[in-house]
Amino acid sequence: MEHLSHKRKVTIMMAIVAAMFFAAINQTIVSTAMPRIIAILGGMDYYTWVITIYMLTSTISTVLVGKLSDIYGRKPFILGGIVFFIIGAFLTGFSSDIFQLITYRGIQGVGAGIIMASAFTAVGDLFAPRERGKWTGVMMAVFGFSSILGPTLGGFIVDHMDWQWVFWIFLPLGVVAFIMILLMFPKVERKQAESIDYWGSLFLTLTIVPLLLGFSWAGKEYAWGSTQIIGLFAAAAVSLLLFIIVEARVKSPVLPLSLFKNSIVVISNMSGFLMNAGMMGALIYLPFFVQGVEGISPTYSGYVTMPMSISMVIISAMTGRWITVSGKYKRYALLGLPIMIAGMLIMAYMNSVTMAVIAMIVFGLGLGFGMPVFSLTVQNAVIPAELGVATASSQLFRNLGGTIGIAVMGTIMSTSLKSNLESAAVSGHAIDMTKLDPAVAGQLKEFANPEMLLNQPKLQELQQTLPEQMQPLLTKMIDMMRDALSSSLTTVFLAGTALLVVALVLVFFLREIPLRSSNSVLEPKLEEKDRNNMKSGNLSSGEVI
């Protein structure tokens, strides 16, 4: 697409940004609203599944679309992704139980994965790596702005309107994004020589699904050493082996193994995996602290997360410009990750809303510096013909990290909470129901569930039904549950900190090569030895145009 005028490219970017914002705002708007929605529909045990299914389906669609968009072009997939997302969001609002909610969120995830994979790759089609820095910053700013508006709006909706509007309010924006992409985005002819890797796609899917199911169920539905969990991991391992065999033989692999010979791609993807595992796994539980421990409403819970988004928007936009001007990127990852670690440590030991706000500001600064880097490094390290699959691999590892992080942190959360409640009972801090009048004990048992902390209106309503002499007992019980929940969240945030530390160590080994100022790797023709150098990440500055 380099033949397009700059004005046309900017117009196309407006359409891409509209599609991305539609997907992003629908993802962030549920963050503060979901605890209340789960409390209304029931099914606290399946809370992580609402997030996990979204990440699972988006992960699979992301990696499968990467190669297909290299063959058919990005436009049909962005359009298809928007349609999937609109259908999923519309149906989600009609959910009558947790299982319907999970199913429809899965459909939304398919659409989100397609949109994100196609959008990020399209930017690579439009602009050379040296120019992509500022546009990557803009796209990060879109996520940041959606993170500012989404949580606050989501909390407001569940506080003042029917929760269904969380999923319906932005559907008109999806229609607008669809029309903009349809009219503005150029059509690319199919590459006739390319074939579709059906078997590779199948075995890749059969690797991802049992892998994520295993992490999601282990420690909750089944023990880590149970037959079911071991069976899922074994199935994932067998499918991975078959996938590798297929990819080594097919003409046009869905995920070329040559990518993993490139040290820059490998380290970037591993760093992105760990960063997302720590970030998503920990941040998804921040509303539990604000709403459950501190007793803040979902509306004000959104205000607590807003500072993170504001600082991320500002810094990511600036970082993108600095990368474009300097052509350097590693320094920003080395700066961003330690700041993220500091923010996560503050989360681990926060004991007030003020501390939570400070943690969000610090963490947002780190995100602003670090997040724009890794997609750019991957795109810069491969030949233009592999742009789609390389970008998809980056999104794949990020999504896997986020999904596995949420699942593992969910296990840590539930296991730690159960242990803390049992410890409180043994230590005598919990109320001994056997010593109470059966009628009194029966009333109090309604409150003996941490889920109750996430639905403040219902908690206050039930609290008003109790006689005054029972209020001190109720206060003691609620304080005990809040202490147990707070201690569990500390464990979750420390686990996220550990993952970010490993990501920081990896970044030290990331080799920096100059950002290309053209989408043509070498002129006039890419020779075989140069193609091999690009695949291994060994281009020197003299070889880069």
Image (cartoon, rainbow, N blue to C red):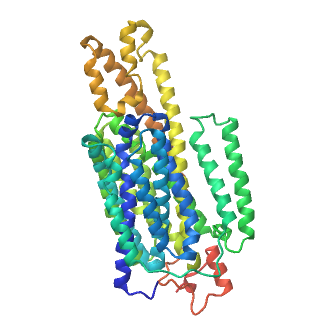
Q: In the shown orientation, is residue 413 left or right of residue 229? A: left
Question: Which residue shows up at 40% across the image and 33% down it?
Answer: 486
Residue 488 at x, y = what percent? 46, 34
Question: Which residue shows up at 43% across the image and 63% down it?
Answer: 82
Q: Is residue 497 visible?
A: no
Residue 414 at x, y = what percent? 50, 33
Q: Nearer the viewer, residue 277 or 434?
A: 434
User: Is 431 placed above or below 330 here?
Assistant: above
Residue 30 at x, y = what percent? 37, 48
Q: Nearer the viewer, residue 363 or 383?
A: 383
Q: In the shown orientation, is residue 467 left or right of residue 525? A: left
User: Is 310 placed above or below 459 here?
Assistant: below
Q: Nearer the viewer, residue 351 or 159?
A: 159
Question: Which residue shows up at 35% across the image and 65% down it?
Answer: 175
Residue located farthest toward the bottom when viewing the structure as drawn: 524
Residue 111 at x, y = what percent? 47, 60
Question: Which residue shows up at 63% across the image and 68% down it?
Answer: 254
Q: Is residue 42 visible?
A: yes
Q: Give residue 148's quadrant in the image.
A: bottom left
User: Is 484 placed above or below 445 here?
Assistant: below
User: Is 469 placed above or below 490 here?
Assistant: above
